[in-house]
Image: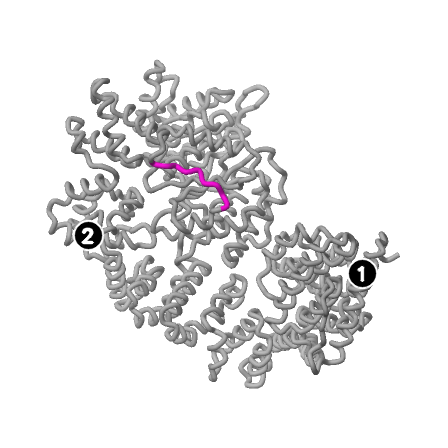
Amino acid sequence: MNVFLSYGHDAYVELAKRIKTDLEAQGYKVWFDEDRINTTHDWEISIEKGVITSDWIVVLMTPHSMRRPDGVCLDELSYARFLGKQIAPIMVRIVPPPLSIARIQWLDMQNCVSDETGKINEELYQDKLRTLLKTLNGEFALGFEGEQARLRDILRPLDNEADIDRHIKDFYGRQWMFDAFKKWVTGDFSSRIFWVKGKAGVGKTAFVAALCHREPVVVAVHFCKFNDNERADSKKAISSICYQLAMQLPEYQAALIDLPELNMLREKNTKNLFNYLLVEPLRSITNPGKRMVIVIDALDEASWGGKNELVDVLTQEFDSIPEWLGIVVSSRPEPEMLRKLSKFKPYELDNMDLRNMDDIRGYFSAKLSNYSSEGHKEAVVQKLVTKSEGIFLYAQEVIKEIEIKRLSLDNVDDFPTGLTGIYLNYFERQFQDYKFYQELIRPLFELISVNFEPLAVNVAETILGWDEYDRDDILEKISTIFPLRQLCIEPIHKSVVDWMTDSGKSGRYRISAKKGHQRFSDGLWKLYKKDLNQLPAYGVKYMVSHLLFIEKWDESIEALNDYSLQEKRIKIVSLDSAMRAYFMELNQVFMLRPELVTIVLTGETFQCLMALHRRYLYDSGLFLDLQKMGFDKILAEKKEFWLPKAEVACAFYLYLTENFIETIERAKKIQNFGIVDNTNTLLQSELYNLIGLNYRKLACFQEARDSFEKSIQLAESSGDLYEASAGYMNIAKLNYHMLDFEDAYMNNNKGIALLTELLESKLKSNAGECTSLKLFLAEYHRLAAETYQWNEKIKEALIHLEIAGNIYKETKVRDRYYVRWLYTSAFQQILSGDYHSIRNDFHYITGLIKNEYDRSRAFFTASFAKLLEFGHTGNGRVLSDAGLYAKEAIKRAKSINAVIEEQEAQVLYNIIAKKSGEKANYELPHGSKQYIKDWVIYVNNYISKFLRRVLKHEDNIFG
C-alpha cells in the first residue's frame, strides 16, 4: 500500500521521518519529499505523481504546514481531495483544521513530541502509531470524540470540501479581486458584507473556493447549489457554518457546547436559530483581535419553496453579530438579490471587464504554451478570448476539448462562441442520433431540470425504467457535461440547465420542466400506490411537490392525508424538515385551491400531527402559517370534535395566536363535553390556567381569578407543584392591577416558593427538565419585579430582575420570556433615570418578539422613555417619537383585545398629547369595570408623577 506523507519543514520534521521509517517497517511504500524531489523544476510534477499513486494521504498538521496562503500541505490536500483519496490527518500541534478537511477527524499526537527537547514520547507515540496503522489497514475509522463529536452529530455540517477542491486545481488569476477583498477586510468594516455579483460562468464560485483555500481570515463556507434543497435549507446552512466556526474558534466552540437547547435546534425557526447559534454565543466571547469572514456562494440558489430565507436572515440579522465577523456572498444579479442586497455595494465580476478579459487571456496563454509557436499563439489566444465573451467557464471547457483533441487549434475560427455555443456544440456532437436523444437522454434531462436534490442514479433507473445496459450507455454518453458525483448525476454548472430549458438557445434539444414534473409524478405515484415501502426516500420527501406543480389535486390531497407517508417523511428527514415541507405544500394548495386545504386541515392525519407536535408547531412559528391558511375560520365552522389531544392543541393554537375569546369558548367545550377525562387533573388544571390567562387579557378579572383558583385546587390535590405555582403567579398579576399590592407580593412569593421546591426536587433529574423549570422561575421573578415596579419599589424590583438575569446568563436561552425580561429591565432603567438605554436596545428587543402583546409592551416602554427624555430635554422631536410609539402600543393591544394594556397606552398617549398642545379627548370605554377605572387613574398618576420629577430635574427620584 502506498502512503503520501505530507508535512511542513518545521520543528516537527523528525516526527515525520520517524513515521516514515515505522510505516516502511510495516511494509508500506511511503512518498516522502526528501527522497523524491531532486530539483525545483521537478517539484510540482513529483507532488502530483506522489498523490496520484498513493492510497492514503497522511498529513501532519502544525501551524507551519496549515498556514494560509503559503502552506504547501494545503495544496497537496486539495489535490488529494479532488482525486477522492483517503485522508488521515495527524494533529501534531493544535491548529484550526483547514476548511477542506474540517469534517474529517484527526489523530491526536499533540503530546508525542516535546517542544523543548524535540524528543519523542515513546509510550504515547507507539499507542498513536498503532491507531494510525489500524486506520490505514481499514481496521479502524478515525472518529470524533467527546464534545466535538456531539457538535458534529447535532449540527451535521455539510460537505463543502469537494466544492473547494474541484475549483482549486485549475484556478487562475483574479488578483484584482483578492486585492479588493483585502482592502475590504482590512478597512473599517462599515460594510459588513462583501457581495460578489456576476453572470453565470464568470467564475464566482472559483473565486470563492480560492478565497477559502488561501485566506486565513475565512473561517467558514457554505456552497448553495442548484436543485439541492439540503443546501438551500437555511437552517442546515446556519448549522453547518456554526460547526466550521467552532472548529476555528475554541472559545466559540465552548460557548456552543454550553447552550442548553442544543438538542432542540430543529424546533427553532431560521431567525431564532441564527440568533441562538450565532448572535448570542459570539457576543459572549472575546474579540479575537482580527477580522474573520464567513463565505456563502451562490446565495441566489438558496431558494426553497419559493422563499430564500438565507438571504432574508442575513440582510435582517447580520448586523447583530460582532463587527469583527464579516461575510462574503456571491450571486447572480437576480432581481431578488438586487432588491434585498441593495444596501450593500456589490463588487461586480463583470464578464466584459478588461481585468477579467486579461485573466482569461492569461489562462489561455498558460494552458496553450505547448500547443503552438509564440507568434501563432498570441493570435489564437486573442480569438479565443473574444469567443469566450468574458465567461471563464467557456475557457475551461474549451481547454478540456483541446486536450482530448475534440477541438483543434488549426480551426479556431470554427470554435463555438460563448457558453451557448459550447453547449450546442456538445449536444450536436454527442447526440447525432436524435431518436436516441428523444427516447433515452431527454427524459433524463427532464428529471434533472426539476429535481429537488442531486439526482441519484437508482432513482433515475426506477423512474425511467432503465436496464443496466441503458444505464451504462447513458451515463457514459453524458459524463462530460453531467458527471457522476457520489452516485448522483449533476450538471457541471447551473447554466447547462438554464440553456436546456431556454428554447431560444437550445432549439430541438429543449427540455420541458413541466414534462420533468410529470415524469416524477407518474413514476413516484405508481410506486406509492403499489406499496409505500417501495417508494424511494426521494419520493417520500418530494412526491407531493411534483404532484402540485402539475396540479394533480386529488393525488396531492390523498398524499397529504396519508399519515403513514408523513410519518415516514419525519423519520427520514427529521420532524423540523418534514413539517416545514408539509406546511409548504399545504400553503401551495391554499394559494391555488383554498377549498382543498380545508379537506386536509379537517382530516385525521392533520389532527394526529397537530396533537402529537403541538409544542413544536408553536415553537417553530408554523402556527402562524396555519393562521394564514384560514385555520381560524375552520375552527369556527367545525361542529364535531376532533381527537382529544388535537382539540387541546386547537385551544392552545387560539391562545398563542391571541384569539382570547375563542380560546375560552374552545377550552370550556373541552371541559363541558368531557373531551378530556375529568380524572386527568393535570390536563384539567392546565386548561383552567389557560382559561384564566385569556380572561386576564380581556380584563375579566373575577372570571380569571375563579379559573386560576380552580387550577390551584386541582394542582394541589394531585401534588402538581408546577400548575399550582403558575396559578399563584397569575393571581398575583390580577392583585396588583386591582391595586392590592400586598396580596400580589404574597402570591408571587407562594408561586416562586412552589416552583423553587419543584426545581430542587428535580435537580438530579434530566438537565433539560431542570433548565425548563429554571426558565419558568426566571419569568416568575420578572413578574414579581413588575409588581414592585408599579408600586415604586425600585430596589426590590431590581433584586428579582437580577435573579432572572442570572438564570438567563446561566442557561443562555432566549425564549419569549427572555424578551419580556428585556423590556421589563428597560422599564427598570427608565424608572432609575436612564431614558437613553432603550434607544439602543429597542431594535434588538422588537426583533426577538413574535406576538402583538409583547410588541405593545415594548412600544409602551419606549414611549414612556421618550416622554421622560422630553421632560429632561424639552426636545419636540423626542415628544413626537413618544407619541408615535404610544400609538403603536395602542394599535397592537387593541388588535388582540388586550384591554388593560390598551388603556395603559391610551393614558400615556393622552399625557403626550397634552404636552404637544393637542386636545386630548380620552375616555374609558362605556361599561368599563370599576377596577379598570381605578387602574387607569393609578397609571395616569404614576406616569404624571415621574414626569413632574423629571421636569424638576431631581437626581434622586425616590429621595
Locate residue 123 relative to residue 466 in the image: left or right.
right
User: Which numbered marker is on residue 946?
Assistant: 1
User: Which numbered marker is on residue 442?
Assistant: 2
Locate residue 790 relative to residue 766 in the image: left or right.
right
Q: Nearer the viewer, residue 363 or 153?
A: 363
Upstream in sequence: badge 2 or badge 1: 2
Q: Quadrant of the C terminus?
A: bottom right
Query: Does 187 sit above or below residue 333?
Result: above
Q: Percent x, y for residue 348? A: 41, 38
Who's the residue at 18% across and 54% down the image? Answer: 466
Amino acid type of the residue that numbered disc 2 sits on in the rendered structure: Arg
> Can residue 756 be seen from the camera position used here?
no
Q: Nearer the viewer, residue 576 or 330?
A: 330
The residue stretch that appears in magenta: 343-351
Locate residue 868 relative to residue 34 in the image: left or right.
right
Label 1: state its secondary structure. Answer: helix
Amino acid type of the residue that numbered disc 1 sits on in the rendered structure: Phe
Query: Does 902 sit above or below residue 239?
Result: below
